[in-house]
Amino acid sequence: MHESHMIEPIIKGIAEHAQTEGAKKVSKVRLKIGRLTGVKEDSFRETFALLAKGTILEGAELEMTSFVGSRIDVVSFDVD
């Protein structure tokens, strides 16, 4: 679960921004994940779902695209 240290700040940042804007729920998160991060998609999805439990992101759909790079970018997220 080495993805935890990458996912926790993403969840925290999105949750803070969404709540500041008055959102009750984040329904979808779009990420660009650099291939050089070593992230395995299935493991990332599982860890994201686990860490999102009990937050405004719980149950959010996760859309991921890859690119040549060594970082993870939040592209956008949808709120309700």
Image: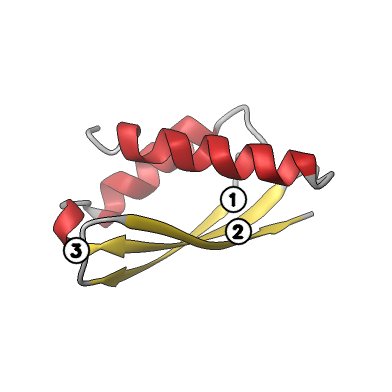
Q: Residue 20: percent from the left, percent from the top?
A: 77, 40
Residue type (three-letter) at the residue carrying disc 2: Lys
Q: Residue 8: percent from the left, percent from the top?
A: 43, 33
> Visible in this render: residue 57?
no
For disc 1, the neighbor class at 10 Å (few under 14, some 14 to 19, many from 20) is: some
* Residue to which mark 1 is pinned: 60
* Residue to which mark 2 is pinned: 28
Q: Residue at x 34, y 55 (%)?
A: 72
Residue type (three-letter) at the residue carrying disc 3: Arg
For disc 2, the neighbor class at 10 Å (few under 14, some 14 to 19, many from 20) is: some
Give the Cα separation between the discs numbered 3 and 1: 23 Å
Furthest toward the right, the residue is 22
- 70 relative to 6 in the view: left or right: left
Q: Residue at x 21, y 58 (%)?
A: 70
Residue type (three-letter) at the residue carrying disc 1: Ala
40 up-or-down from 20: above or below: below
Q: Is mark 1 on a helix, strand or loop?
A: loop
Q: Residue 74: percent from the left, percent from the top?
A: 48, 58
- The disc, 2 or 3, on the residue closer to the chain's N-terminal end is 2
* Residue to which mark 3 is pinned: 35
Quarter of the picture holding the N terminus: top left
Q: What element carries label 3?
A: helix
Give the Cα separation between the discs numbered 2 and 3: 22 Å
46 up-or-down from 8: above or below: below
Assess whether mark 2 and mark 1 are in contact (beta carbons under 8 angstroms): yes
Q: Which residue is drawn at 59% across and 45% down?
A: 14
* Number of the label disc, if any, that sits on residue 7: none
Give the Cα separation between the discs numbered 1 and 2: 5 Å
- The disc, 3 or 1, on the residue closer to the chain's N-terminal end is 3
